[in-house]
Image (cartoon, rainbow, N blue to C red):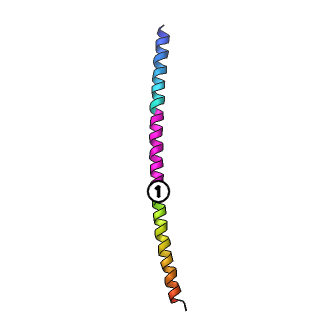
């Protein structure tokens, strides 16, 4: 009887750890997704910025080339 109680306590605590562990994992996954979306958004904005600067230099080059 005593062994059954010990086993049931261990299985309950293991189940609780599994639930909290999976919740932590999903929070970490959400943080990673949020971070990556910010990084890709910044990349898109900066690439647009550098593309516009490059276009300006090309236009200037066309003006000065005879």
Q: Residue extending furthest right?
A: 66
Label 1's element? helix
Residue 40 x %, y %: 49, 57
Q: Which residue is mark 1?
A: 39
Q: Residue extending furthest bottom?
A: 66
> In percent of the image, x 46 and y 42: which residue is there?
28
Relative to 50, is 33 above or below? above
Residue 31 x %, y %: 44, 46
Callout 1 environment at 10 Å: few (<14), some (14 to 19), or many (20+)?
Answer: few
In the image, the segment drawn in magenta is 21-37
> In percent of the image, x 49 and y 11: which residue is there?
3
Residue 7 is inside the magenta segment: no
> In percent of the image, x 46 and y 30: which residue is there?
19
Relative to 10, is 49 above or below? below
SS majority, magenta? helix
> In percent of the image, x 54 and y 89: which residue is there?
65
Residue 26 x %, y %: 47, 39
Relative to 48, is 58 above or below? below
Most foreground residue, 21 or 37: 37
Relative to 22, is 37 above or below? below
Q: Residue extending furthest top?
A: 1
Residue 36 is inside the magenta segment: yes
Pick the quarter of the image with the C terminus. Answer: bottom right
How many numbered callouts?
A: 1
């Amino acid at each position: 009887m005593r062994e059954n109680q010990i086993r049931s306590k261990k299985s309950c605590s293991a189940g609780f750890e599994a639930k909290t562990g999976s919740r932590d994992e999903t929070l970490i996954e959400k943080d990673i997704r949020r971070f990556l979306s910010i990084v890709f958004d910044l990349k898109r904005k900066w690439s647009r910025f550098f593309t516009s600067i490059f276009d300006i230099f090309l236009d200037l080059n066309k003006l000065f080339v005879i």
